Image (cartoon, rainbow, N blue to C red):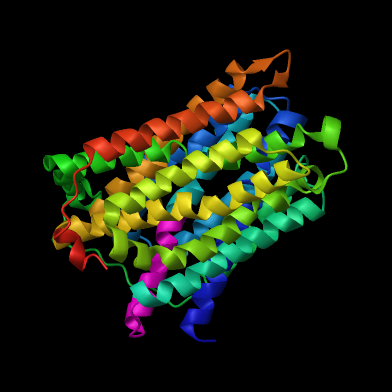
Amino acid sequence: MNIKTRLTILNFLEYCSFGSWLLSAGAYMIVTLKFSGTQVGAVFSTLGIASMFMPPLLGVIADKWLNTEKLFGVCHLILAVLFMFLSRASSFNNFYLIMLLISMVYMPSLALNKSIAYHFLEKGGHNPAKTFPSIRVWGTVGFILVAWTIDLMELKFAKEQFYLGALISTVLGFYAFLLPTIPIDNSKGKSLFQRFGLDAFELLKDKNTAIFLFFSFLLGTVLQITNIWGVPFLDDFKINYADSFAVKHSVALMTLSQMSEVVFILAIPYFLKKFGIKKVVLISILAWVFRFGFFAIGTPEGIGLIFLVLSMIVYGVAFDFYFVSGSLYINHIADTKIRSGAQGVFLMMVNGFGAAFGGYVSGFIVDLYTINGIKDWTSIWVAFTIYALIIGIAFAILFKHNADSEKKLI
């Protein structure tokens, strides 16, 4: 089996693990465990909290003490055990603590996954920038397939979804140990300060880059909102639309968003080359406005269902056009000596501080518009729509891009 096939299997299983709970855990917490909106938001904010410090910490361990592929395998074996504990947790405190531990193990495994792929692709004479996307896309396929499995087996309100996650992580953990060994770098030229990528914070000396990273935080707050609340939102239509596809198969409907990602990620080079980073980001923010706005007016049947489907379609633009283009832009403007650290800073702002803050605030907004247990979803989605619109206007005014410097971006 060639290395590209082995890496494809690795990515497929990695995102199968994520898809086994990301879209459905919110519904499980609300319907089965009776958590409040603030509690659900707090649980999902653990993804952001873990992303602030765990990826560089495990990166140091991989550099100095344990081979990357073995550390990746250990992470998923630990993850499998934690999923089993999560299936037995019923109180908020226990569920939150275990999910925090899961996030601390899973989120850095995403970075280790990329390190493994880049190492073997470069060793095999492949260009990672050209080859990795065709490998990574199978991760999205895995996410979609396992989410459909959860949906068709009617597990979105059941603890068995975590059993499936545990099984997948167990298989992936042992599979990682079958990969060729990646030598420990143990570079003596790097200080601990550099290993954590902290030298990349010199990017903040440039005002425009600092503004871009600040908006990375603001857009990071919307990253998981629809993943957290999409299924609970659709499930609340069961009173009037109990037999509709959107209600009975809400997880499957939400995976149209991931299908959209697969399509629109391929359009990024064209849009960056034709419009530049500022316009591409504005297109992304506008897509977030439509993402939330279509949810606000969507219903499970008739023209309302069309609005829901349109919301899924624009998600690919909303997500990829900022989070992928932004990564490329940061890589372009950063000095070659700090590019790895610069990516870490970008991800810290988006997946770390942004996602953590967004989890808490979204839960607060949901509770704010919940009266006697009934959620006013229209007002909730309108609030998020207005937030995204304000971000777009502010970005258009404050961010000043250098058109000449972008000519070499793509």
| Residue at 72% over, 53% down | 252
State the image coordinates of residue 396 (x, y, percent, origin top left): 28, 40
Q: Is residue 276 visible?
A: yes
How many numbered marks have been drawn onto this rendered protein structure?
0
Main secondary structure along the magenta-highlighted residues: helix
Question: Range of the magenta residues?
Answer: 109-127
Front one among 218 and 87: 218
Residue 87 to residue 125: above or below = above
Tell me the quarter of the image containing the C terminus: bottom left
| Residue at 43% over, 66% down | 267
Residue 374 in which image quadrant: top right
Q: Is residue 150 left or right of residue 225?
A: right
Q: Is residue 212 left or right of residue 348?
A: left
| Extreme residue toward the right, this view | 243
Q: Is residue 350 left or right of residue 197?
A: right
Q: Magenta span has 96? A: no
State the image coordinates of residue 9 (x, y, percent, origin top left): 57, 72
Tell me the quarter of the image containing the N terminus: bottom right
Residue 88 in which image quadrant: top right
Front one among 30 and 6: 30
